[in-house]
Amino acid sequence: MSEQTRAPETGDGFEDTGANGAAETEAGAQPSLQAEKERLEAEIAALKDKYLRAFAEAENVRRRADKEVADAKVYGIASFARDMLTVADDLSRALSAVDDETKAQAEGPVKALLEGIEITERGLGQALEKHKIRRIEPRGEKFDPNLHQAMFEVPDPSVPSGTVVQVVQAGYVIGERVLRPALVGVARGGPKAEAGEAKPQTEA
């Protein structure tokens, strides 16, 4: 029986998995790292968006609160101010009941009384003005339904139709809001009023 000889093993035919395995692992890790990076970037963007939205909402809440506080300071006295307008009307009617000649001839206690009523009326007007309450005297101005309430019409071709020619009761505004519309008489029969005419004047 002949002896069979084998060539010494040189390693030929065996795959070296060390370097190749590392390369494959690194190649496989690249997509995984990229995906993780994209995921984290998307998460950061989402968190940033949520933060900006929350910040904007908080800013809106703060602005609304500031506006409510400011409005409360101006308009919180509206109910009380309406009651005070009755006092202002009474003072004005008391002075209107006395004609200029009687006022000029008044002496002693009567003169002092009239002067006292005038001083009280001015003081009340200044107090109202201090709290941004202004008197509306729109005589000669274009009728504005936002500020005036028409009580009657007056035939008057000498002025444009819609012009306030008589003020029955003065109106008042508080801040930018109407506290009480002015009760007025409006002209009719004249030329049509032009757009853009001056707004009714306000007085203390």
Image (tube, rainbow, N blue to C red):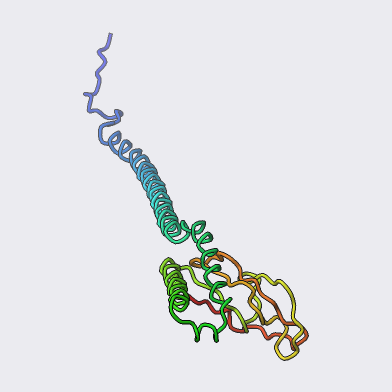
Q: Is residue 174 above or below residue 118?
A: above
Q: Position of residue 40 (x, y in %)?
A: 36, 44
- Please identify the residue farthest to the bottom as the structure is shown: 158
Q: Position of residue 99 (x, y in %)?
A: 57, 82
Q: Position of residue 117 (x, y in %)?
A: 47, 72
Image point 30% across, 29% down: which residue? 13
Q: Nearer the viewer, residue 120 or 23?
A: 120
Q: Position of residue 86 (x, y in %)?
A: 55, 63
Relative placement, left or right, of 156 versus 110 is right
Relative placement, left or right, of 108 versus 10 is right
Image point 48% across, 59% down: which residue? 75
- Please identify the residue farthest to the front as the structure is shown: 108
Q: Is residue 144 above or below residue 198?
A: above
Location of the N terminus (image quadrant)? top left
Q: Quadrant of residue 71?
A: bottom left
Count all numbered tags in the image, as a single digit.
0
Q: Is residue 36 above or below residue 177?
A: above
Q: Quadrant of residue 15?
A: top left
Q: Nearer the viewer, residue 34 or 53?
A: 53
Q: Is residue 108 above or below residue 76?
A: below
Q: Nearer the viewer, residue 38 or 6?
A: 38
- Please identify the residue farthest to the top as the structure is shown: 1
Image point 68% across, 86% down: which residue? 194
Relative placement, left or right, of 4 versus 203 is left
